Image (spheres, rainbow, N blue to C red):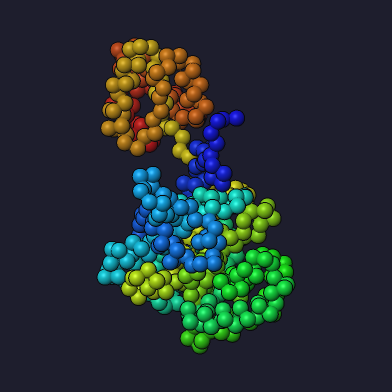
Amino acid sequence: MATFQSPRGTRDILPEDQPSWTHVKRVAEEVAMQMGFSPITVPTYEELSLFQRAIGEGTDIQDKELFIVRGRQSNSDEERYALRPEGTAGIVRAFIQHGMQTRTQPVKLFSTIQNFRYDRPQKGRYREHTQFDLEYFGDVSPFADAWIIYTSWRILERLELHTVQLDVNSLGTEEERIHYCKKLSLYLEANAEALSEDSRRRIHTNPLRVLDSKDRNDQGVREHAPTLADSLSESSATHFKEVLSYLTTWNIPFTINPFLVRGLDYYSHTAFEWTVNSDSGQQSSLGGGGRYDGLMKKLDGPHVGAVGVALGLDRVVELLATQNVPVPKSKKPDLYLIAADEKGTVFCTEIIPKIWQYCPKLHLECDLGKVNVGNQLKRAVKIESHYVLVIGTQEQESGNFTLKNLRDSTTEHYSSLESLLEFLKNEG
Ligand code: HAM
C-alpha cells in the first residue's frame, strides 16, 4: 500500500473517469449560458464569520461540518477562515462587495465549485464534493424561482436523467417561519419523549429540521405536527401557487412535500430538492435550492431578492454510471508520429510546429524519446490513434510520406509534406 492515501472522504478522479465529469460540467454550463447565466469564480475559503452568519446556528453544516483554516503565520489562535461548505454565501458576498445591485437586474450567475463538509463519509457523501451552483439576483417574483428550477431541470434532462423527482415546498416569509417555529416547538416539546436525541436537541434551536429527520420515531411525531402551509399568509401562498403554475406550463413534474425544509437556514418561500430513488444505497438528494431574500440583508448588503440551486455533481456523475447513460468518450489522437531512426527523430521534431501551424486543432501524439518503431506503433494502436505517420531517413530525403489509417487499415501516399498537411487539416 502506498505510504500516502487521499484523505478520508476525498477521492482522486482518474483520467478514465474524467469524460463523465467533462460531459456533466459542459452540459451544465451550456444550459446555464443558454438560460442567461454568466460564470463567476469566488475563493475556496472565506471569512469564517461569513458562513456563521449565512448558514445559521443549529444546522449540521455550521455546527459540525466546517473545515476551519488557520494560517501558519497567524500570531493568534483566532479561527478566521473556513473552506466553503457551499457556494451561495461566497457568491452573495461577491455580489455585495462589487455593488452588483447597480448593474442591470436581474444578475444571473453560475459557478462549478469544490465544497468541503466534515461529514461522515459514505457512498455519494464526501468531505470534498463538487457542485454546479446557479444564483438569480434582483427579482422577487415567482418567475425567478421557476426559472431556477427550470434551468436545473433542463440540465438533468439534457444529461438524460429522466428518473429524477422534484419535491417543492414553501417556507413562507421569515416572519411567518418564526411564527410557525414557535408553534412547532410547542408541539415538539409536548411530544419530546417520542423524539430522537438529535431532534430533542433541536426543539428550540432549529425545530424545522425535525420535520425532515430520517429517524422513524421523528417521522411518527411529525405526522400530526402543525403544517407550514397553514401558517402562510395569502401573498406567500399566491407566490407558491404561481411558481407551481410555471412548472405545470413547462411540464416539469413535481410533488409538494410539506416536510421539505432544507439543511441551510437562509431560505424563505420556495424550497425544492431533486431526488432519485436510491436502491443502490446512493445518497438520494441530487440537488436543491430555493429563495433566500433575507440573506443579502443578513450580510449587510442591499435588499435584493435572490433564489438559487446547486446540483451535486458527484452524485450526478455516479447516477449516469448506475443508469448506464452513455457519455461522450474522450477524444482519441488524430495522428501518431513515429520516428524510424535518428534522422527521422530530428525531422519529426522539426515538423511538429509546422503540423500545428497547418492543423491547429489536430490531436497529435508522439513518443520521440523511444527509438523502437514496434513499441511506438503498439502504443499508437493501444491509444487508438486514427492515423500513423512513420518518418525515417528515406521519407526525409525523398519527401514522400505514407499515412496509415488505423481504423480501416488503408494507406495513402503523399509526395510532399504540404499535401499531407492539406489532408490532415480537415481531420483535426
Ligand atoms: P445543499 O442541499 O446543501 O444546498 O447541497 C446541494 C447538493 O450538493 C446536494 O443536493 C447534494 O447533491 C450535494 N452535496 C451536498 N453535500 C454533499 C456531500 N457531502 N457529498 C456529495 N455531495 C453533496 C446548497 O449547498 C445550497 N448552497 C444550494 C443553493 C444555491 N441554494 C441557493 N442557491
Q: Position of residue 328 (x, y in %)?
A: 50, 45
Q: Position of residue 68 (x, y in %)?
A: 46, 52
Q: Judge by depth and name the residue closer to the eye, 334 or 370.
A: 370
Q: Residue at point 49% right, 24% down?
A: 379
- Height in image: 233 above or below 392? below
Q: Judge by depth and name the residue closer to the eye, 402 or 379.
A: 379
Q: Judge by depth and name the residue closer to the eye, 207 or 122.
A: 207
- Would you say residue 15 is visible in this rendering? yes
Question: Which quadrant holds the C terminus?
Answer: top left
- Would you say residue 246 is visible in this rendering? no
Residue extending farthest to the front is 76
Q: Quadrant of residue 278 in the image?
A: bottom right
Q: Residue at point 37% right, 68% down?
A: 299
Q: Is residue 196 toward the left or the right of residue 137 in the image? A: right
Q: Position of residue 418 (x, y in %)?
A: 28, 26
Instruction: Count the labels in the image.
Output: 0
- Height in image: 372 above or below 7? above
Q: Is residue 396 toward the left or the right of residue 250 in the image? A: left
Q: Residue at point 45% right, 14% down?
A: 372
Q: Quadrant of residue 292 in the image?
A: bottom left
Q: Residue at point 52% right, 38% down?
A: 14
Q: Position of residue 9 (x, y in %)?
A: 56, 46
Question: Which quadrant holds the N terminus?
Answer: top right
Residue extending farthest to the bottom is 234
